Amino acid sequence: MRKALITFAPCPMPYAPCPMLHIRKKNMKAKHPMTITEKILAAHAGKKRVCPGELLNVRIDLTLANDITAPLAIKAFNEIGAKKVFHRDRVVLVPDHFTPAKDILSAEQCQVLRKFAKSQHLTHFFEIGQCGIEHALLPEKGLVLPGEVAVGADSHTCTYGALGAFSTGVGSTDLGAAMATGRLWFKVPESIQFIYYGKINPWVSGKDLILFTIGAIGVDGALYQAMEFCGETIQRLSMASRLTMANMAIEAGAKNGIIEPDEITLQFIQPRAKRPFRIYQSDKEAHYAGVKEYNTSKIHPQVALPHLPSKVKDVREIGKTEIDQVIIGSCTNGHLDDLRVAAKILKGRKIAPSLRLIIIPATQEIYRQALKEGFLDIFLLAGAVISPPTCGPCLGGHMGVLAEGERALATTNRNFRGRMGHVQSEVYLSGPAVAAASAVKGRICHPEEVVKKG
């Protein structure tokens, strides 16, 4: 595969192309210091400098929609008289929410996408067999790259900020316009810097860090702001954990979440990228609306209680909370790393007879790798059921809808009332380690209750 051309740009004008993984910084003060989010938006609006609050007409690198939101976007596309998408390689359709189709209406939704993709000769339409949960699939396919602007008619489009892109969710009408024109307007958000330092405790992942953060600032703590994650702890996180953190920025009300690309990012991106990309970094003198620091050595596995992602507690403070169902998967925690953690805990063990365990690999490739590494066999022997890639239960669609009075622990990203089924059901959120251990115990617990130290 051809390697993409990489340029490094601490300011809107890039460095000369450089194939090295090491990111070099200029030892000079920026004339007009900006954050990484501001720089990406400035470059895509053709400006040398932008400021928070400024309205911009922004060039879009990629648009995305799924089987729920795409039909509305396609309707808007047609209503404005558009005949052709702005670029057939940059409009991506992924039916993943109610697929495999759970009923006739779901099948018809997918049919709308299929017909549009065919009529517009779209390069990237991912049907069953090639499909995956959109926010795991696009990074895997190298479709969103550092320094780009990506928009999707799904709130968790902010996931791609983990790659150093500006990515955010938009309404279906806006997406229809972007599909036609390749442009959208944005108000430049203020940025909040979140600095994480210290040693990461056992069984703690990016999911625990972002849950802790949302618990600290609230569901509107970063309203229409950019959450910029940085610090020595972030630099040590895997791409899976970074994707999880950016994914859940929206749960704090953020416009986007973002992490500066580093060697780990480039090791992930380089084999996948099929076009040139540019790396941006925040200037040291950049202005932030706030700076928050967290010592991760004091953060242990976290759980969000019903019915908000901000109602977070240390798992050791939960008490004996019995559960009926555990879900390990979703765009937030259906990565191979997540399944690996779950398999480590479940190996040689059985789930509690009182509950159901549903495992959902986020993409076909993750499913295949999990099979190759023996994880699926471990899950099956433990008593789990394994689903094809789908958002399914996360939004109460199918593959694990809750009945009245039932309680689930899920590695998903949202636990609003009625989110996973009946309005009188309850959803708790955690990382894969807590979820797997809790499936064994039949109640929410710390992984160390199942896998002893040493």
Image (cartoon, grey):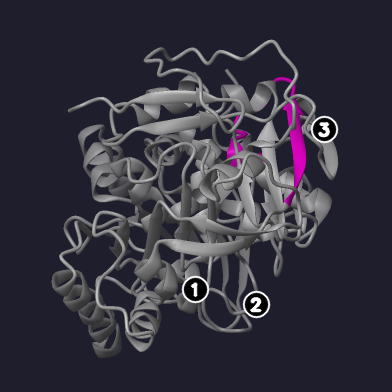
Q: Which residue is mark 1?
A: 174
Residue 341, horizontal then vertical, whole percent: 46, 35
Q: Is residue 90 left or right of residue 18?
A: left
Q: Which residue is mark 2?
A: 417
- The amino acid beneath tag 2 is Arg
Q: Earlier in the sequence, mark 2 or mark 3?
A: 3
Q: Is residue 232 above or below residue 215?
A: above
Q: Is residue 196 one of those drawn in magenta?
A: yes
Q: Would you say residue 222 is visible in this rendering? A: yes
Residue 62, horizontal then vertical, whole percent: 39, 54
SS at badge 2 = loop
Q: Is residue 296 left or right of residue 234?
A: right
Residue 386, horizontal then vertical, whole percent: 30, 56
Q: Nearer the viewer, mark 1 or mark 3?
A: 1
Q: Marks 2 and 1, how far apart in space?
A: 28 Å
- The amino acid beneath tag 3 is Glu
Q: Is residue 193 above or below residue 105?
A: above
SS at badge 1 = helix
Q: Quadrant of residue 400?
A: bottom left
Q: Would you say residue 208 is visible in this rendering? A: no
Q: Earlier in the sequence, mark 1 or mark 3?
A: 1
Question: Which residue: 79% across, 30% down?
Answer: 298
Residue 72 vs residue 199, the one in the foreground: 72
Residue 308 vs residue 282, the one in the foreground: 282
Residue 319, horizontal then vertical, whole percent: 75, 53
The part of the chain drawn in magenta is 190-209
Q: Which residue is mark 3?
A: 293
Task: Categorize mark 2 by other alpha carbons within 10 Å: few (<14), some (14-19), many (20+).
Answer: some
Q: Is residue 427 left or right of residue 30?
A: left
Mark sitting on residue 251:
none
